[in-house]
Image (cartoon, rainbow, N blue to C red):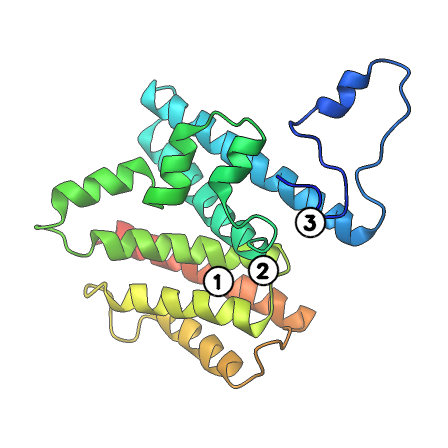
Amino acid sequence: MSSQGLGVGIPSQPGSLLAQGAGAAEVKLYSNKKEQALYESYADLYAIIKTTEKLERAFVRDAIGAEQYEEACGKLIGQFKVLWGSMKDTVPSVEKFMSDYNMQCPMAATRLLHSGLPATVEHRTKQSRANDPEAVAVAETVQHFITAMDSLKLNLAAVDQICPILLDLINSMDKIQTLPPDFAPREKARMWYSKLYQKAANYELPEDDVRQLMYELEASYNTFLTTLRTK
């Protein structure tokens, strides 16, 4: 990753600052809060990629159950989408980021950049698509719920950040024909989308609204999962 465009010195590989040896003067990577936030985003992205790689390998080695893997992987994919969406200006290519930091994570690259679905969902969907056309929509709905909640946790609460996610969530639930027409989670998402759609794109949700939306998303997500289990 080039340091010239950032105006700060970034080591070519993680940990290279430590190579100066014991007793070397401490080098600060940032001089203001904006640069600090940038480095923290780099660290979060690095951690998500590494964690996904370890999770994929654990699943392949049967060191983790399918249900545990699917839940953890879905969460990581959602976190990756939210984080990368907020830093595409500084990291336009995740592949280059991985190359610059010598990240040997081919399985994570496949899962996060190309598939976008946990392996269990991806292969189950491929096998059952003809008999269960709603499988993809169910997987997408789970991811959209997680992405929406993670966005709020990362303080991405502007209209142009939240509305597209809510619209994706609504559309994915619309594809699940077994859900009742007045399904409460879908109606809640529509209500919030209509409310926010009327605001300016840069309008930030007040703290009370963020808290309420998070509460309703979590309740709706739990209702959605319960509904699936009872079918």
Q: Looking at this view, name the residue that lies furthest to the left.
A: 130
Q: Which mark is residue 152?
A: 2
| Mark 3, residue position | 5
Q: Nearer the viewer, mark 2 or mark 3?
A: 3
Kindly tell me whether residue 139 is visible in this rendering: yes
Circle 2 Cα neighbour tier, 10 Å, few/some/many (<14 / 14–19 / ≥20): some
Residue 148 x/y as whole percent: 49, 60
Decide: is 124 above or below 174.
above
Q: Which mark is residue 161?
A: none
Horizontal side, residue 227 vs residue 197: left or right: left
- Quarter of the image for the C terminus: give it: bottom left
For marks 2 and 3 on the same chain, the one whose residue lies earlier in the sequence: 3
Q: Quadrant of residue 145?
A: bottom left
Residue at x 42% of width, y 71% of height: 189
| Mark 1, residue position | 217
Circle 3 Cα neighbour tier, 10 Å, few/some/many (<14 / 14–19 / ≥20): few
Kindly tell me whether residue 226 is visible in this rendering: no
Q: Is label 1 in contact with label 2 (beta carbons under 8 Å)?
A: yes
Q: CA distance from mark 1 to mark 2?
A: 10 Å
Decide: is 105 above or below 82.
above
Q: Nearer the viewer, mark 1 or mark 2?
A: 2
